[in-house]
Image (cartoon, rainbow, N blue to C red):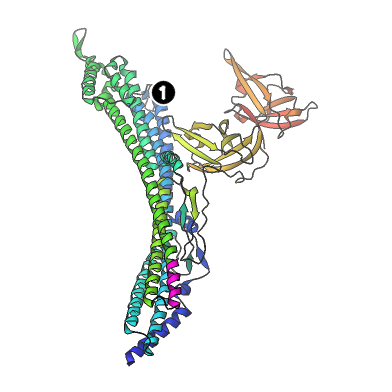
Amino acid sequence: MNVYKWKRYLCALLTVTFVLTLSPIEAQAANKTLTSAQAVVLAVRNSSDISKRNNEIILKQLQYSDTVASAQAVAKSIRSFRWTPLLSFSFPSQLDMGETYDLQIQPIILQVELNTLKYSLNEVTRTVENEAQYLFLECYVAQETIAFTQERLTSAEADYLRDSARLLIGEGTQEDVDYMEDRVDTLTTELTDLWRSYELSKSSLSDMIGVDVSTGYTFRNPMLTADIPRTQLDNLVNYTLTYDLSYYEARMTTSTALINLEGYETLMKNYYGGAMGTIQTYINMAKNGQDIDYAAFMLAYRSFLTQIDSYWSGTRRILFFKFNLEWFKGDLSGSRYIEDEMYAVYNACMEYSNALQNEAMVKESVETQVRTSYESIGSASRAYESLTESVAEYKEDLERVTALNKLGQATYDEVEVALTLYQDTQLLQVEALATYNELLYDYDLLTCGAVSKYFSGESLSLDGDGSGESVTILDVTSDPYYYITNTVLDLMFHVGVVIPDGLDPTVTYFEVWCEDYQIGSRVSVDEVVSHLATDYGGTNLLTLRFYDGDTYVGECEIDASVAYGALDFGTVEVAAEVLPLGSYAGSTQNYGMVSTSTLSITTAVSTSNAMGDATSYMVFYQGQAVGSDTAIAIADNLSYLSVLLVSLDDATIVFYDSSGTPVEKGYFDTATASIWPVE
């Protein structure tokens, strides 16, 4: 054999020796292991999009608060007597049509925009999580494919070395050596391309999570499978429609359009009630979602405008002078406002009709996507299962051909063909599983997290590391959770809980608290607490307190900006529950220039107070007794001059036992007419 062949033989020998000693994957491996769940958490924390959306929510909250305060100030100013040092007087007046509309509608529109931003924050967060899962999956697949390709290259180089050695002793052929040389070159090129792609994926993941994972990290198996019952498809559709941002925006647009329509309708009725009959039928049809002949509506609307303007046509004679009636309209009347937006009601009807149609289209689109994507996932799952079966079959074929080769009943070429087919099919299996996981990620994003509970780990035959990572996510069918919805029509928020049967501890009632103040009243877990959205102010933290009948069970804090989440009764450590000492009722009687107030007390005995021993009481204001210098029986009413105590907000009450010893001290909560202990 010539010198060139000997040099190539020695190079191959050195290459195999080096590869067997230290593979690239082993060279970079360290003790740090990154999981998909960790990458998702880091990505959320590092996301500028999420930070930007949070800032937008804060700004919108400030804008909403300023607008409400400004509207109240403007309304108060217009309805109040005003004067300046230059003796310019403005007497109280009523809001005109335009001012009434702006003051009523603008805060509602801002509330809708604020709620939409909060919904979009959940959407942005889920999108970031989805992108992080994608990038992590790319890194893991590249990592395992490189390791597998490295093994194939090592095996090919060993075969090349063996064939070259056989050729030296006359037992091999040049064709076998050339074939293995080409195979080594091909696998080397593949490995180089894989490394390049791997580095790019790691760089993208590093940028997203804010941690450099280009070196010193290995990626744990994130592969998942999901058994999503077809019987749950309708539930998935309904769940998605509840929390999907695009459908929420469509619903809010419809609600806002209806508010706009009803606002204009009410204002117009107040000014032109008698003339509204001309167009009222069309307005009712629009509000009921019926099809409208807008050409006929336009004719009727123009007739309506002519009718309301007819009152100011012609002239009026006063003494020897004639005046145009239009002069008597006033500085800014309803009709003056209508001149600026003559077709306001007509346009509002059309906008509401369009919004209804768009809402129906978005709903149909979302439902179609959920059902179509479900079928795509099923197809991808079946493709992966088919390749898994093929891998098992090709493995059996390889073992059989290898055994026959050892007996001299199968050629070396047959073994190589079986090995190549087995290895290539394994790579196809990995690609199919990766595609299946990407579809699962996308479907979970599409359904707003509804299918996460069906995820389970899936191991790879290429990975000697074992099964995939277990994913723990809220299971809406077996875990207790809360949900929050907003109603734009009345600016109400609704807080509800779902408590599964058999939960320990038993929970039958719950309350909603915000910064030590109760919102609404205690309700059954089957009901919701509904109140004005402004009741929880600018804070996002609410506290839910749970009861089994009248027995306190526990409480936990929730984030009001998140539409739903798990309930953990151990989230907040609390002391013994504080209950009211009782309630009160008051009345005032006027006697000319003097008025007296009467206060009656009802006590509430509980294990957290000593009201069971209370027999009398005294009321104090700024350290002075009110109404009586001595304690009076609880059954008796307390009478006092109203001027001595204008409001009970700053007063305190002390309860005494039969011996005159104080047993409880409380303050008056005028919002709920209750008495609470002073801590």
Quarter holding the C terminus is top right
Quadrant housing residue 489: top left
Quarter holding the N terminus is bottom left
Residue beneath the point at 41% across and 69% down? 146
Q: Amino acid at mark 1?
A: Phe
Q: Nearer the viewer, residue 131 or 608?
A: 131
Determine if residue 59 is in view. Answer: no
Q: Main secondary structure of the magenta part?
A: helix
Q: Nearer the viewer, residue 209 or 359?
A: 359
Q: State how many labels appear.
A: 1
Residue beneath the point at 38% across and 87% down? 171
Horizontally, is 575 left or right of 50 in the view? right
Residue 372, position in %: x, y? 36, 45
Horizontally, is 570 left or right of 307 in the view? right
- What span is in magenta? 395-408
Mark 1 Cα-neighbour bin, 10 Å: few <14, some 14–19, many ≥20: few
Q: Which residue is mark 1?
A: 81
Horizontally, is 514 left or right of 61 in the view? right
Specify whether residue 397 is painted magenta: yes
Q: Secondary structure at mark 1?
A: loop
Quadrant housing residue 17: bottom left
Q: Is residue 650 above or below residue 226?
A: above
